[in-house]
Image: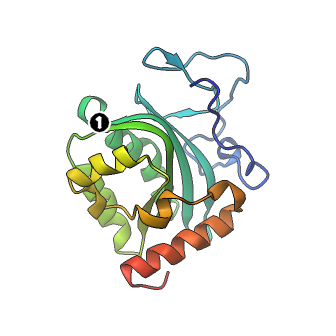
């Protein structure tokens, strides 16, 4: 797992540690010191903590004018033991929402498992953004993770599956990725974003 770095090709567009509005502003990273672990496995030092021992993220891009954010994740999404959704909501999402962000693209290729706890933070997040035509899109999550989320109806809070599970997002600029996801979400939800 230590070789899985957050996507870095968009650093010429955005760096969370240099953004005063980011929850990760002024963070310093080591390229050589591996000190953070998920269970017994070291992870790359560029991942950011959300105060969970099993789930880490990286804000890849934020556009305050268009009001969207793209986040990448690694680890195990464990609401049952560590209430990861609460940690994510309080440590990252609330900060971004306070700056006007209401559309979220969550990239989950490196999320290995999902364990359900309760849905109150998903419900809170969904309620806060839908008044403003906001949405949360899950991009490239593993099939078994999506199936586990669907089993307990979390898919009612997210736009997921279909094209969103097969998108080659690394070939796109952040703006083009957002446009593609926004078009997909708009078609599914029946509104123009």
Between 139 and 81, the one nearer to me in the picture: 139
Between 158 and 26, the one nearer to me in the picture: 158
Q: Is residue 119 above or below residue 27?
A: below
For the point 67% across and 67% down, the residue is 175
Q: Is residue 159 above or below residue 23?
A: below
At which x and y percent is residue 103?
A: 48, 65
For the point 42% across and 18% down, the residue is 39
For the point 66% across and 36% down, the residue is 26
Q: Is residue 35 above or below residue 152?
A: above
The answer to whether residue 94 is seen in the rendering is yes
At which x and y percent is residue 32?
A: 73, 18
For the point 32% across and 62% down, the residue is 126
Would residue 7 appear left or right of 154 to someone viewing this image? right
Would residue 123 appear left or right of 38 to someone viewing this image? left
Instruction: Give the quarter of the figure containing the N terminus.
Output: top right
At which x and y percent is residue 115?
A: 28, 37
């Amino acid at each position: 797992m230590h070789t899985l770095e957050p996507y870095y090709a968009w650093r010429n567009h955005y760096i969370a540690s240099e953004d005063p509005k980011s929850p990760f502003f002024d963070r310093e990273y080591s390229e050589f010191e591996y000190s953070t672990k998920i269970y017994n496995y070291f992870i790359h030092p560029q991942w950011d903590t959300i105060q969970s021992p099993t789930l880490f993220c990286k804000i890849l891009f934020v556009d305050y004018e268009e009001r969207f954010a793209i986040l990448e994740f690694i680890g195990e999404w464990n609401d049952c033991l560590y209430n990861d959704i609460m940690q994510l909501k309080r440590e990252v999402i609330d900060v971004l929402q306070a700056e006007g962000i209401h559309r979220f693209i969550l990239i989950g290729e490196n999320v290995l498992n999902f364990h359900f706890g309760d849905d109150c933070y998903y419900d809170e997040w969904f309620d806060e953004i839908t008044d403003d035509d906001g949405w949360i899109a899950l991009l490239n999550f593993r099939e078994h993770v999506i199936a586990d989320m669907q089993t307990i109806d979390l898919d009612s809070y997210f736009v997921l599956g279909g094209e969103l599970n097969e998108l080659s997002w690394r070939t796109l600029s952040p703006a083009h990725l957002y446009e593609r996801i926004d078009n997909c979400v708009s078609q599914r939800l029946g509104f123009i974003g």
